[in-house]
Amino acid sequence: MSRKSSTQFGVLGLVAIGFLVGYLVASSDQPMVSEAIAAADDDLNQEPEVSPTKARPSRETYYPNTEDLAPDEMRVVACGTGMPTTRAFQAAACFLVELGNGDKFLFDCGSGAAERISSLQIPYNYLNKVFIGHLHTDHFGSLHDLFIGGALMGRNVPLQVWGPSGPTEELGTAYALDHMRKMLAWDIACRVGNVDPRGYRLEVEEFDYKGENAVIYEENGVTIRSFPAIHGIDGSVSFSLEWNGLKFVFGSDTYPNKWFVDYAQDADLVIHECFIAVPDLVAKMRFTPESALQVGTQVHTAPEAFGKVMSQVKPRMAVAYHFFKDFDTAAAVHDRIRKTYDGPLSLAEDFMVWNVTKDEIKTRMAVTEEHTWAPPLASPAQAPRADDKQRYAKMKGIPIESLEFSDFTKSGYLDVDDVLRPIYEEASEAVGKKFAYPGDK
Ligand SMILES: [Zn+2]
Ligand SMILES: [Zn+2]
C-alpha cells in the first residue's frame, strides 16, 4: 500500500468513526424512542400466524366477553369520563373495576353511565356494588337507571351503594338515596306483579366522610378505603381498592389535597379528576373569565395541578378524566399536565380499558355493543307471584286498589282481546303450558 493511499484510508477511517460516534451519541439522547422501536420490532417478530380464514385475537382492541381475566389481573373500564353538561360522546364519571377473583365494583355512576355499563354485557348480578364519591349528578345521576334498568335486565339481588355522609343529615348519601327511592315510588309500584321483584331492593351504606384511609369494605381479599376530598362543600371523598398486591385509586372530584397524595402512594392505577383548561372553559363552555377561573382552578383540579399531584404520587399509570376530550381541547390539557408531570399518563375517554398486572399495564380502547339487550342471567329469573301486589301494598302500607287501574281508567280500554288472545294461545303451544288470558277463568 502506498503512503498516499494509506493516508486516504486514515482520513476515511476517521470520518467513519466520527459518524459512528455521532450516531451513538444521537441514539443515547433518545433511549425511549429506540426502546419503543425495539419493542415494536419484537412484536412484529411475534406476529401470530396469519390466515385468510382463521380468527385471530386483536391485541389492540378490547372486545368485551372475549378475554378471560387472569387470577392475578385487574381490568378497569371507563364507563364515563365527562362532565355534568351531558353529551353523547362522553357519559359522566364512572369506572368499572373487575378483579381476577370474580369481584366487580363500580366507582361513581354519573349521568349517562348506565348505558355504557349495559354495552359491556356483564350479568347484572355482578354489578351490584357501587361506591359514590360525592353527590353531584355527574357522579351519581345514572344510579336510578342502574337500579331500575339493572333489575329489568336480570339483577335479582339488591343494589348495594356506599357513599359519604355530609355536613348535615340532609346532605348525606342515605338521605339522597332514600329520596331517590321515593322518587321511584310510582316506577316501582307499576312493575309489581309484572316482573321478578327481587332486584328492586336498595341497600345503602353511609360512612363518615372524615374517615382518613378508613376501611369501608373488606371481603374476599378486597379492601376498599375512603379518604376526604375537597370539593363543593364537605362530604366528598376518594377511594382506594387493594387486592392481591394491586392498588387502584379513584378520586371523585377534588381540589388537590394532601390525603390523596398520602393515601394514593404505591398505587398501580390512579384516577384523578383533571378539569378542562381555563381558556377553553371561556371559549367552549361560554363561562365568564371569573367563573372559568373559579371553577377551573378552585372548585376542580386544573391540569397543571393534576400533574403536580401525580408527580408526588408517582403511580404506574396516571389517569386524567373529567374534561371533554376533543381534537381541539386535548392538546391543551396534555401540554399543561406535562409542565408538572412526566410519568405514564392516560387522558381518559369512555371505553378506555386498562389491564393491570404486576408486570404490565396495558391500555386499550374497547369496541362495544351499541344495540344492547339484556346480558346472560347469573341466576334464573322468577315469574311474578300471584300475590306480589298484596305483599307490596302491605309492606308499603298503601291500599291494594292503588296498584290496580281505577274504573275511570278502565273505562278507556279499547277492545283488542281478539288480537291479544291468539298471542297467549301461541305462547301456550310453544312452551307446552297453559297461559290463561287475563280475565278468563
Ligand atoms: Zn362534583
Ligand atoms: Zn364532577
Image: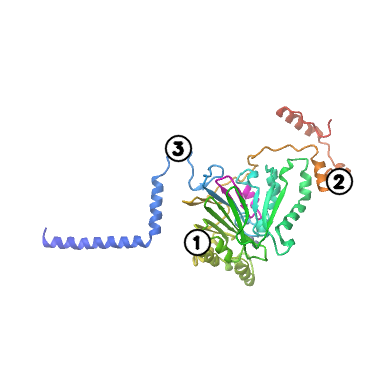
Residue found at the far bottom of this picture: 290
Mark 1 or mark 2: whose residue is earlier in sequence: 1
Q: What is the distance, in whole Å, between disc 3 and disc 2 at their CAs?
A: 67 Å
The tag on residue 52 is: 3
Visible residue check, residue 55: yes
Figure check: 34 above or below 73: below
Mark 2 Cα shell of 10 Å, populated few (<14), some (14-19), many (≥20): few
Q: What is the distance, in whole Å, between disc 3 and disc 1 at their CAs?
A: 45 Å
Residue 108 located within the stretch drawn in magenta: yes
Q: Which of the four quarters of the rendered structure image does ligand 1 lie in?
A: bottom right
Is residue 152 shown left or right of residue 310? right
Q: Amino acid at mark 2?
A: Pro
What residue span does the magenta drawing correspond to?
Answer: 97-117
The tag on residue 399 is: 2
- Between disc 3 and disc 2, the foreground one is 2
In the image, what residue occupies the spot 80% across and 37% down? 386
